[in-house]
């Protein structure tokens, strides 16, 4: 089964997507220099959530977001 992937290099956006319920499908890949690439399953909702994040319309629980950022950052080291 071939599923589409969405690659994200923004740590804050990746944390937001995880807390919003999107599935991280691969651990961060740092083969692109020193930037980590987070891979998510492509869904119809992911683009809407990405736009919501950048347009400051996204809402998630703040402590869950901060915890997820720390967790994802730990995966990159």
Image: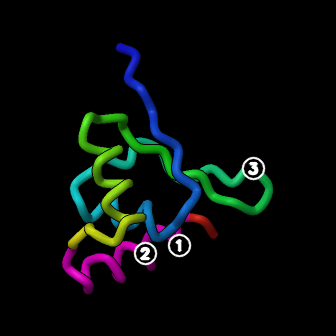
Residue 17 is marked as none
> Which residue is under mark 1?
73
Residue in the image at 69% along x and 54% along y: 30
The percent coordinates of residue 76 (x first, y second) are 60, 65
For label 3, the SS is strand
Determine the secondary structure under disc 2: helix
* Prevailing secondary structure class for the magenta stretch in the rendered image: helix
Q: Residue furthest front?
A: 55
* Highlighted magenta segment, given as a residue range: 60-75
Q: Quadrant of the C terminus?
A: bottom right
Instruction: Give the Cα distance between marks 2 and 3.
Output: 20 Å
**Residue identifier under label 2:** 69
Q: Residue furthest top?
A: 1
Which of marks 1 and 3 precedes in the sequence?
Answer: 3
Q: Does the magenta-highlighted stretch encompass residue 3? A: no
Of the image marks 2 and 3, the number of the one nearer the N terminus: 3
How many numbered discs? 3
Circle 3 sits on which residue? 32
Horizontal side of residue 21 vs 6, given as left or right: left
- Placement of the N terminus among the 4 image quadrants: top left
Residue lying at 59% horizontally and 52% vertically, measured from the top left: 37
Q: Position of residue 24 (x, y in %)?
A: 38, 49
Is the Cβ of the residue at disc 1 closer than 8 Å to that at disc 2?
yes
The 10 Å Cα crowd at callout 1, few under 14, some 14 to 19, many 20 or more, is some
- On screen, residue 8 above or below 41: below
Q: Dot 3: within a 10 Å radius of its alpha carbon, few (fewer than 14), some, or many (20 or more) residues?
A: few
Residue 25 located left or right of residue 49: right
Q: Residue at x 41, y 43 (%)?
A: 40
Q: CA distance from mark 3 to mark 1?
A: 16 Å
């Amino acid at each position: 089964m071939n599923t589409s992937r969405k690659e994200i290099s923004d740590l804050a956006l990746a944390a937001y997507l995880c807390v919003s319920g999107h599935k991280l499908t691969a651990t961060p890949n740092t083969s692109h220099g020193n930037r980590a690439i987070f891979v998510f399953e492509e869904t119809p909702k992911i683009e809407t959530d990405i736009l919501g994040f950048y347009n400051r319309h996204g809402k998630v629980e703040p402590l869950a977001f901060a915890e997820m950022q720390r967790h994802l950052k730990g995966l990159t080291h």
